[in-house]
Image (tube, rainbow, N blue to C red):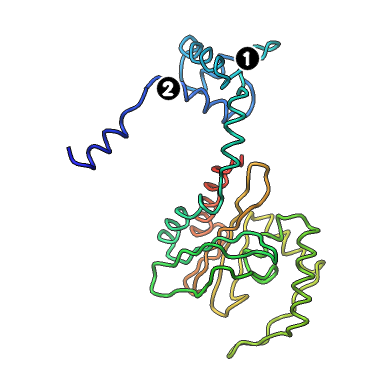
Amino acid sequence: MDDNNAKAERDRRGIQSVEVGGQLLRALAHAGRPLPLKDLAREAGMAPAKAHPYLVSFGKIGLIEQHEASGHYGLGPLALQLGLIALQQADPVRIATPLIADLAQRIGHTVAVAVWGSRGPTIVRIEESPAAVHVNMRHGTVESLPGTASGRLFSAYLPAEKVRAALEEERAREKTLGLRTQPGMPPPKPLPRWEDFEPTLAEVRAHGMSRSEGAVIQGVSAMSAPVFDHAGHMVMAVTAIGPSGVFDTRWDGELAQALRECARAVSQRLGAR
């Protein structure tokens, strides 16, 4: 038996009863609340008489507990401990890295991951476009809050006081450095004040993602989708960047849908519901 066949054989091996019982745990996790035996068995796709022995065994090791008053079954203390440990070990960037590689291949554009750093949204991972045309980006680049898709996304979902302070710092840096004009481009617009920025943030929240069209570099557009953790806090932005002429910025376009799916997959791995 060659190595590939041996690996396939190992992957097929398992204990079927564990996999069957796991359907009950999956059903409880999906429901998000304790369930009576009949409902739990139905959600797991099995008869109550078949489900009950699994629940007894799971109860003995703490994966499931039965509430005395109602008789409903819920997740037990061991399940809670395992969940907390999994959340502690979850690394959003590590989880996202293979997914953005697949995403870049699917959509044909460069995909970047940004997290909130000491100076604002910061690029920490880049997956280059498979197409011949590339958008030049660097790890460690700090994104403008009002001027980029990822910046607008963080601004819409982070606490307002944090974003407002970061925007004032960015405005102060702009005032110190002055507005720099790139060759062949019109002078950049001054950064908006907070009250002028708020309508843009409302649009981002309404669509659940953000976009920019030639805002930073002429002829380059971007769309960004948020990643949330188990507490509902935004922890990362997944952003696609490409030439405006072939970049679909429609809110309901295929590119937007692919971005949402990727961000949702990472969020689910982090415990977001």
Question: Label 2: which residue?
Answer: 18
Q: Residue at 76% x, 63% y: name it.
A: 199
In the picture, which quadrant includes the N terminus? Answer: top left
Q: Is residue 65 above or below residue 155?
A: above
The amino acid type of the residue labelled 1 equals Gln
When asked about the image quadrant of residue 116, the answer is bottom right
| Left or right: 27 as drawn, with respect to 201 | left
Q: Is residue 270 left or right of residue 134?
A: right
Q: Is residue 269 left or right of residue 149?
A: left
Q: Amino acid at mark 2?
A: Val
Q: Are marks 2 and 1 in contact (CB under 8 Å)?
A: no
In the depicted view, which residue is nearer to us: 44 or 83?
A: 83
Question: Around disc 1, counting alpha carbons within 10 Å, would you say few (fewer than 14), some (14 to 19), or many (20 or more)?
Answer: some
Residue picked out by circle 1: 66
Instruction: Give the structural element (helix, strand or loop) at label 2.
Output: helix
Q: Nearer the viewer, residue 247 or 66?
A: 66
> Which residue occupies the extreme left position in the image?
1
* Residue at horizontal 54 percent and vertical 54 percent from the top: 93
- In the drawing, does residue 12 fall left or right of residue 214? left
**Residue at the bottom extreme of this rendering:** 184
Residue positioned 50% across, 63% down in the render: 111
Q: Residues within 10 Å of mark 2 (few under 14, many from 20)?
A: few
Out of 166 and 78, give the one closest to the viewer: 78
Q: Position of residue 153 (x, y in %)?
A: 66, 60
* SS class, disc 1: strand
- Measured Cα–Cα span from mark 2 to mark 1: 20 Å
